[in-house]
Amino acid sequence: MTTLLHSAVAVDARGETPDSWLLFDGGVIALAGVGPERPEADVTVDLSGRWIAPGFIDLHAHGGGGEDFATGALVAALRAHRRHGTTRSIVSLVSEPIPKLLEQLSLVADLTVLDPLVFGSHLEGPFLAPGRRGAHAEHTLRLPDPVLIDELLAAARGTLRQVTIAPELPGALDAIQQFVAAGVIVAVGHTEADFLTATAAFDAGATLMTHTFNAMPGVQHRDPGPIVAAIRDPRVGLELILDGRHVDVNVASLLFAVAPSRVALITDAMAAAGAPDGNYHLGSLEVSVRGGVATVAGIDTIAGSTLTQDAAFRMAHLGMGLPRPAAIGALTATPARILGVADRFGLLAPGYVADVTVFGEAALEQVWAAGEQVG
């Protein structure tokens, strides 16, 4: 089955191209071009007056559509995010007792076989600093241990894509090397690390920062901390929750200014993303969502977000004034590069996956994933 999308402005990290067309052959972009001379196709879609971008990649999300990934209701949660442009996802898991984490990792491994739009899992814990644990139950936190790490890797069966570690914990630097040797991306986060400790983590192989600015020391003029260490290292990608609540837009603008091609917009979404206010769970913790803000029940600790990636794009482009290619790049090409799949994901070009979002002005209208319309 071939599908032709035509007469749209194509936008990706490289820039904008008017009057563009794409030819899908199955799940891949077979051809791309501009102008009225277009190939024949089994299905033709006229996108006059609209603009298109690659499908979004979310490195960090815990649920959506009223469902928590940790409960096993993965399909419904993923479907909710796909309606908002996220065509490829990593399933993030909060800290849990180890037997439960092993079970969850195995479930995600099974899901990647059934759903190729899922890259794999992200362990946001249990190797976190207690004082920066955020919405992670303290009794579930653990110190890095090589035997435990082997158990986690075995349960994931090659589908663990990312792990968050506080590098100041005893054994953390060895753990970073162990995970990296197994092909897992290591992120620094939920940490009390200072500049030197974070630098040591990046030198040990960590290449990402979990939701930059949140659950870590801030930037001080005599104590630069882990954020400056990440910004100064060109090997390091920087996750950012751009919902206007987790990070002030002026601070977010500064991050884009100093590391323009390394910021990856994530949702860190919990179950209430794409769902009404109410009471939910994030792992074992009860979460209250009021006015779209998720907090641990009874206290004011933020518990993930209710963000979707199309809303993050609008905040970046319309709220911050970021040019469309830069805003789209932070949702597509940058996360693809962080994952090591930039040769197949994140651009509108031949040989890349047929993942496309279709916009009228700034409003998302259609979503295509692997050559099929999913939203």
Image (spheres, rainbow, N blue to C red):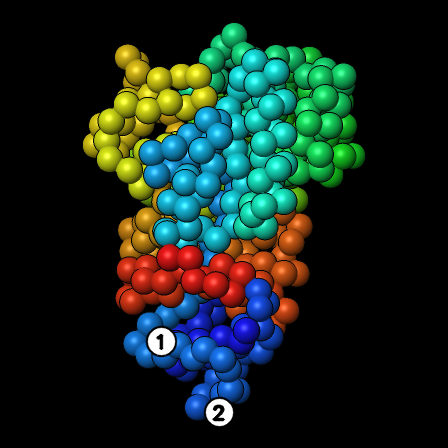
Residue type at tag 1? Leu
**365 relative to 260, above or below:** below
Q: Secondary structure at mark 1?
A: loop
Residue 59 is situated, as x and y percent measured from the top left of the image, at 53, 42
Q: Nearer the viewer, residue 259 or 132?
A: 132
Residue type at tag 2? Glu
Q: Which residue is mark 1?
A: 47
Q: Residue furthest top?
A: 139
Residue 262 is situated, as x and y percent measured from the top left of the image, at 55, 48
Q: CA distance from mark 1 to mark 2?
A: 15 Å
Q: Quadrant of the N terminus?
A: bottom right
- Residue lying at 39% horizontally and 77% vertically, measured from the top left: 45
Q: Nearer the viewer, residue 63 or 257?
A: 63
| Residue 223 seen in render | no
Q: Secondary structure at mark 2?
A: loop
Taking the image as shown, residue 63 lies to the left or right of residue 198, namely left
Q: Quadrant of residue 175?
A: top right
**278 relative to 171, above or below:** below
Q: Which mark is residue 37?
A: 2
Q: Name the N-terminal-most of marks 1 and 2.
A: 2
